[in-house]
Amino acid sequence: MIFASYSNFHKKVREIGFAEAAKQTAALGFDAVELIQSSHFEKTYMKTAADAVANKKILDDCGLGVSCYSLPCDVLRGERDRVLEDVFRHIELAAILGSPYFHHTLVPGLLPQPATPIGDLLSGRLAEMGETIAKRCNALGLICLYEPQGMVVNGVDALVAWVREMRERGCRVGVCGDLGNSLFVDTPPTEIFKALSKDIRHVHVKDYFYGEQPLANAYRSRNGKYIAVAPVGQGVVDFEACFACIPDFDAAVSMENDGPDEEIKRSVAYIKSVWQKVKQA
């Protein structure tokens, strides 16, 4: 299992710059980083191919790989060609960095709404954009990944149907096994891992408090439950049950946690202990 720094690395980049962030991340014992970028962020750290080349050298010098390149985007919002132009630019940066995967969101909104009929996901602009993006990734040697995310392409039925549709369209795709996002549609992460275990290529580690009790800084699920970020191992996510669905997994688990370094260390130690328990079972 490879451990990648995700949110914490991005936070460090924004605060102290890419080179120093890479040094500190390597010093924490990480094997890799997951890069997250968006043209909508206040500050980006890669805009050109030259930036990607320079950043790859920094990571190489620190002994860090790139486990995945992630892009928050809404493929239904904005003029089609401009959206694709922006996404394609990020795919090219991901390829330069040597990332095996390109993970992008589809319809990321978290406002509670009724479930979208599966058939509606597989027709029109959403599927056409997904196919176009995935095939550009494939042409550059990347596999396109999707996670349960937002209120549309989330939950077991929707995600299974989406992956099947992309494959029927000739795309090489997989799943990012996010350990919390399915709670936004009131689906335990274990159900996602059971249904899509053979498709999971990458894992996002996080934990949430979830329930009827009002919480500070909380989101609301589709059914009105309260959801708030929890320290890894203290929320409702059953990490052992999820990992038991993928006992032969040997790729990257990415720590989606932007807490202080000591919290990150505790989270990594906890995940290692759970994984060891699963492997010994």
Image: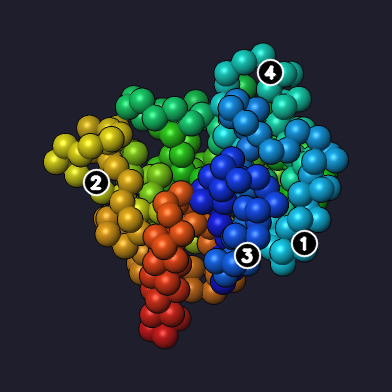
Q: Is residue 126 left or right of residue 120?
A: right
**Which residue lies under the disc numbered 2?**
210
Quadrant for the N terminus in the image = bottom right
* Residue furthest to the top: 79
Q: Which numbered circle lies on residue 26?
A: 3
**How far apart are the alpha carbons under marks 4 and 1?**
36 Å
**4 or 1: tag closer to the N-terminus:** 1
**2 or 1: tag closer to the N-terminus:** 1
* Residue at 70% across, 31% down: 87
Amino acid type, mark 1: Asp
Q: Please tell me whether residue 257 is drawn above or below residue 41 in the rendered image.
A: below
Q: Is residue 208 left or right of residue 47?
A: left
Q: Please tell me whether residue 50 is drawn above or below residue 180 in the rendered image.
A: above
**2 or 4: tag closer to the N-terminus:** 4
Q: Please tell me whether residue 168 is drawn above or below residue 230 in the rendered image.
A: above
**Local secondary structure at mark 3:** helix
* Residue at 80% across, 41% down: 51
Dot 1 alpha-carbon crowd within 10 angstroms: few under 14, some 14 to 19, many 20 or more: some
Q: Are marks 4 and 1 in contact (CB under 8 Å)?
A: no
**3 or 4: tag closer to the N-terminus:** 3
**Which residue lies under the disc numbered 1?**
60
